[in-house]
Amino acid sequence: MITTELVFVRHGQAQCNADGLVGGPRTCTGLTNLGYAQAEQAARRLATEHLKKPFDVVYTGPRIRLVQTGEIIAQTLQIPVHHDDRLDGPVHGDADGQPWDAVKTAADGGPHAHPDTPWAAGSDTWNGFLKRASRNLSQIIEENHGKRVIFAAHGETVITAHTLLLGIPIDSPAGFTHNHASITRWQHHRNRLGQTRWMLDRHNDTEHLSLLTPEPTP
C-alpha cells in the first residue's frame, strides 16, 4: 500500500537559465515562454492523474521561477499552493547574476567539484546546502504524511530528495540529471507486515514535453 506520494516537478526554463546566469533571488525574473509551455504540459499530465487519484497540495519555494511553475500546476489541478522558504535553492552569494561559465572557471568547477568550499564569496558549500535542504525536506515530508504532494522544485531539491531517501552519503561524487519540467516521483510503501520503505517510481520523466521545441544543448 502506498501511504505517501511525493511528485517533484522541476521548474520550467527560466530566463536566467536561457541566459546562462546564476539565478539567485536578485536575478531570477521568472519563466521564459518555453518555460511556461513546459510547466503547462507538466500540469496537464498531472491533471489526468489527479482525476483518478487527487493530489492534496502544491509546495513551492520563494524564487519566481518556482512560484510561477507551482501556480500553473495548482490552478490547473484546482488545489492549494503553499509557498515555503524551506524549499529555497542554494545561496549563491556574489555569484548571483554572474555568468555560470565565469563562476565555474573562477571556482575551478561547479558547486559539486569542491563540495566543502564555497563557489563564490558568501555562497553555500554544496555539502552545506545538501545538509540544510535534507533537514528541511525531511520536515515537510513528515508534516505531509499520508498525502499526495507536488513540489515545484529546483533541480537541487530533486537531488536532495534522492540523497535523503536513498541514504546517499552527503559527499558522494555521483549525481542525477534533471531537465526543466521533468517529473520525479517517490512513494512510501507499507506492506502487510507493517514494514515500510521509500521507493523511487520514476526520475527525470519528460515524456509530456515531447511535442515542445527542445532546449539547446549547453
Image: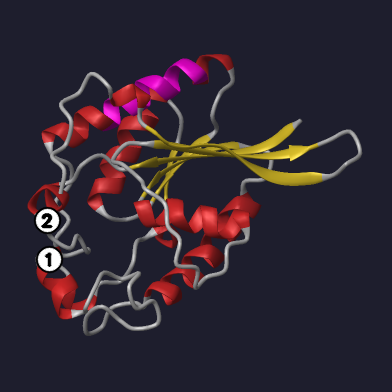
Look at mark 2 in the image and give the residue it sits on.
20
Q: Which quadrant is the N terminus positioned in?
A: top right
Could you tell whether 146 is left or right of 81 in the image?
A: right
Q: Residue at x 53, y 64 (%)?
A: 134
- Is residue 124 within the magenta segment? no
Q: Residue at x 51, y 20 (%)?
A: 50
Residue 103 in the image, given as x and y percentages of width and height: 15, 72
Tell me if residue 162 comes above or below residue 182 in the rendering.
below
Identity, as a three-letter code, of the amino acid under mark 2: Gly
Front of the two marks 1 and 2:
1
**Residue at disc 1, secondary structure:** helix
Mark 2, Cα crowd under 10 Å, few <14 / some 14-19 / many 20+, is some
Tell me if residue 211 comes above or below residue 111 in the rendering.
above
Q: Residue at x 83, y 35 (%)?
A: 191
Question: Which quadrant would residue 212 be assigned to in this image?
Answer: top left
Identity, as a three-letter code, of the amino acid under mark 1: Asp
Disc number placed over residue 101 in the picture, else none:
1
Residue 188 in the image, given as x and y percentages of width and height: 68, 41
User: Is residue 77 or residue 151 the one in the foreground?
Assistant: 151
Question: Which quadrant would residue 122 be assigned to in this image?
Answer: bottom left
Residue with the most extreme right position: 193
Main secondary-structure element of the magenta-colored stretch = helix
Mark 1 to mark 2 CA distance (whole Å): 8 Å
Question: Which quadrant would residue 4 be assigned to in this image?
Answer: top right
Tell me if residue 136 comes above or below residue 19 in the rendering.
below
Residue 84 can be seen in this image = no
Q: Which range of residues does the magenta coloring cover?
A: 39-49
Q: Residue at x 17, y 63 (%)?
A: 22
> Dots 1 and 2: beta carbons under 8 Å?
yes
